[in-house]
């Protein structure tokens, strides 16, 4: 199984994303966002994570006799910002 993880806004590949299968181990995306993971036929829960920048993405993938499938994923960035103020204790 292979594919590319891209940013939902910029549409560019994201490097450093961990791709984990519940039955086939894990890998990390390269500089272009590409990954390749050896899987066998069957149903796999595949999780894509890059904390704390993006929301995790989880897909259930069913693979028949040909384990060479392409699973492209879009990542949505978590909101960022600055919180300012004064903390008071009552």
Image (cartoon, rainbow, N blue to C red):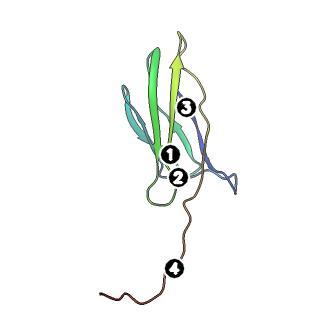
Q: Answer yes or no: do the residues labelled 2 and 3 have beta carbons within 8 Å?
A: no
Query: Could you say which disc has been placed on residue 2 in the image?
Result: 3
Label 4 vs label 2: CA separation? 26 Å
Q: Secondary structure at mark 1?
A: loop
- Quadrant holding the C terminus: bottom left
Furthest residue toward top: 65
Query: Could you say which disc has been placed on residue 13 in the image?
Result: none
Where does label 1 land, which residue? 29
At x 53%, y 9%, the residue is 65
Label 1 vs label 2: CA separation? 5 Å
Where does label 4 land, which residue? 82
Q: Answer yes or no: do the residues labelled 4 and 1 have beta carbons within 8 Å?
A: no
At label 2, counting other C-alpha atoms closer than 10 Å, the crowd grade (few under 14, some 14-19, many 20 or more) is some
Q: Answer yes or no: do the residues labelled 4 and 3 have beta carbons within 8 Å?
A: no
Q: Nearer the viewer, residue 71 or 59?
A: 59
Residue 82 percent coordinates (x, y)? 51, 79
Residue 74 visible? The answer is: yes
At x 49%, y 80%, the residue is 83
């Amino acid at each position: 199984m292979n594919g590319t993880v891209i940013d939902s806004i910029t549409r560019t590949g994201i490097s450093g994303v961990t791709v984990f299968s519940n039955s086939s181990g894990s890998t990390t995306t390269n500089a272009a966002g590409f990954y390749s993971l050896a899987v066998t036929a069957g149903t796999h829960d595949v999780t894509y994570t890059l904390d704390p920048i993006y929301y995790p993405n989880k897909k259930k993938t069913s693979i028949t006799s040909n384990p060479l499938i392409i699973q492209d994923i879009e990542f949505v960035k978590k909101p960022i910002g600055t919180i300012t103020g004064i903390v008071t204790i009552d």
